[in-house]
Image: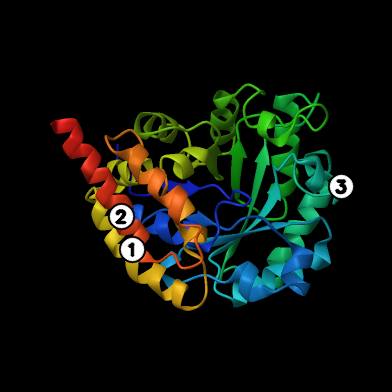
Amino acid sequence: MNYKDKILAVAPMMDWTDRHCRYFHRLLAPHALLYTEMVTAAAVIHGDRARLLGFDAEERPVALQLGGSEPGELAQAARIGVDLGYHEINLNVGCPSDRVQSGRFGACLMREPALVRDCVAAMRAAIAPARARVTVKCRIGVDDQDEDAALADFVDTVHAADCDVFIVHARKAWLKGLSPKENREVPPLNYERVYRLKREHPQLIVIINGGIGGVAETLEHLAHVDGAMLGRTAYHEPYRLAEIEHALFGTPLPDRDDVLMRLRPYVEAHLARGDRLQHISRHILGLYQGLPGARMFRRVLSEQAHRGDAGWGVVERAIAARRGGLRDRAA
């Protein structure tokens, strides 16, 4: 099977997929579509845009995920995002947290497909489609909704606003009784429902999300849908991204140490601006996951990167500690 036209993406994850994480992930997966953390439309309009929306050119293609439910506000935020160079504007209709529900956005909007349609229409009208596309990330349903009927009605309604890309987390969201963490684990995965969405709407681009752990699972999904979006696996075991990139697009597998050497200029540039090492190094903790010496690598970074004077030398000591662990193991 030819995978060249398939989509590999890393999910937007609050407190995780910041600009440092995205730069690191780009070194591992040159073809992946990367996403910001969710940013509310109001924050885009009124907040510190450099802090919330800043990104390096090397991160592209990168998508901005917005949270909100007011069409005019979302349209203004989408226009700002496109003017800043974002490749895609994504509307969050999947997050189940209480904070999101109280603001009337996220997964609770699956109960209001007509409102989502109006939001998408306003966002599309605010930007030239040639500059960026507007997409929606959703669940297969919420609470006691019927997964078949609810998802079908939602997609049909939103598609009427010319939205043709749906990223579907293959779980329901239980808005009452489950925490956000539990909502990522407790509701059962229903991949077949997402596959059927693609079969019933072949004209749509359907990207599947939820519980995807590696190459074999990704390839299985891509036999049925257009793309696969990794979430926590990409964060905790980031080298999986490189492995999937290699399987899909033939990109040579990078040496992990070489990845860090390529990251060094970025780290030093941000340290020179006053950023702290721990804000970057936290994203690389899992790079050697599953390999001998990985624990020593994580330990050095965890114990030393938080210091005020921590610089690239801490990363070098972590690499050396891992290699020392390898020598000890060989002996």
Q: Amino acid at mark 2?
A: Arg
Q: Which residue is mark 1?
A: 313
Image: 203 above or below 148: below
Q: Which residue is mark 3?
A: 102
* Residue 174 location, quadrant: top right
In the depicted view, which residue is nearer to us: 131 or 65? 65
> Does residue 90 appear left or right of residue 241 in this picture?
right
Q: Amino acid at mark 1?
A: Gly
Image: 144 above or below 317: above
In the depicted view, which residue is nearer to us: 247 or 266? 266
**Residue 132 placed where, x, y %?**
57, 66
Hey, which residue is sitting farthest left in the picture? 331
- From the viewer's perspective, is the residue at label 2 or at label 3 nearer? 2
Question: What is the distance, in whole Å, between disc 2 and disc 1 at their CAs?
Answer: 6 Å
Image: 57 above or below 210: below
Q: SS at mark 3?
A: helix
Q: Residue at x 26, y 34 (%)?
A: 292
Marks 3 and 1 in Cβ contact (< 8 Å): no
Q: Residues within 10 Å of mark 2 (few under 14, many from 20)?
A: some
Tally of numbered tags: 3
Sequence-wise, which precedes: disc 2 or disc 3? 3
> Does residue 132 appear left or right of residue 261 in this picture?
right
Q: Which residue is mark 2?
A: 317
Q: Residue at x 28, y 38 (%)?
A: 293
